[in-house]
Every structure is written in structure tokens, then in C-alpha cells.
Image: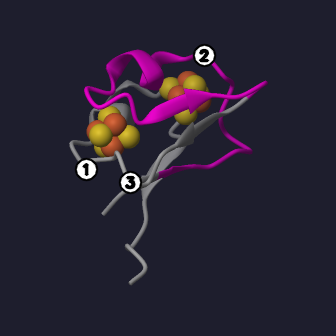
Amino acid sequence: MPMVVIKELCSGCGACVRACPNQAITLRVKESEVDQERCQDCEECIFVCPNGAITGVSRKH
Ligand code: SF4
Ligand code: SF4
């Protein structure tokens, strides 16, 4: 399942952006965002996020 960022928990540190091997995460003004098309579910971003702000969601078809 692709990841999503829980905006309330994201501090905008950018760790997930650097960790993602697919350049699927973009850092916004104060929060990051996952490109659902690029995310390959490797879960690297989950492990590096210091705030537990990234979680998986079911793909919508
Ligand atoms: S799960 Fe992997 S591919 Fe998907 S956003 Fe996180 S680091 Fe990138
Ligand atoms: S690692 Fe977590 S806190 Fe840092 S930018 Fe990514 S989602 Fe936000």
C-alpha cells in the first residue's frame, strides 16, 4: 500500500524525502507529500521519520 503523511505529525524535516529511492516524496512548506504513483511501498520513509508521520493507506481502484 502507498504511504501517506499525517500532516499534523510532520515537522518538515525532509528525512523521508532523502530516504525515498523513487523520489516519491516532495517537501511542501512545512510538510511532505507522497506521490502515490511513484511510491513502491518500500517503507523506507516510515523507518526514517522521527515523528511517526508516515503510514500506509489502501490503494483506491
Ligand atoms: S514507501 Fe518507499 S517508495 Fe513509498 S514514499 Fe516511502 S520511501 Fe518512497
Ligand atoms: S520524515 Fe516525517 S517529519 Fe520528516 S518530512 Fe518526512 S514525514 Fe515529515
Position in image of residue 18 (x %, y %)? 40, 15
Mark 1 C-beta closer than 8 Å to ligand 1: yes
Q: To which residue does mark 1 refer?
A: 41
Position in image of residue 43 (x %, y %)? 27, 42
In front here: 9 or 30? 30
In this rendering, the label closer to the viewer, 1 or 2? 1
User: Measuring 54% from the left and 17% from the top, which residue is drawn there?
Assistant: 14
Q: To which residue does mark 2 refer?
A: 13
- The answer to whether any part of residue 50 appears in the image is no
Distance from Cα at disc 1 to Cα at disc 2: 21 Å
**Among numbered discs 3 and 2, the one appearing first in the sequence:** 2
**Of helix, strand and loop, which one carries label 1?**
loop
Q: To which residue does mark 3 refer?
A: 37
The vertical placement of 36 against 58, above or below, is above
User: Measuring 38% from the left and 73% from the top, which residue is drawn there?
Assistant: 59
In this rendering, the label closer to the viewer, 1 or 3? 3
Which residue range is magenta in the image? 4-30
Instruction: Tell me which amino acid carries mark 1.
Output: Asp
Label 3 Cα neighbours within 10 Å, binned few <14 / some 14-19 / many ≥20: few
Please name the predominant secondary structure of the magenta segment in the image: loop
Distance from Cα at disc 3 to Cα at disc 2: 23 Å
Residue 25: within the magenta? yes
Mark 2 C-beta closer than 8 Å to ligand 2: yes
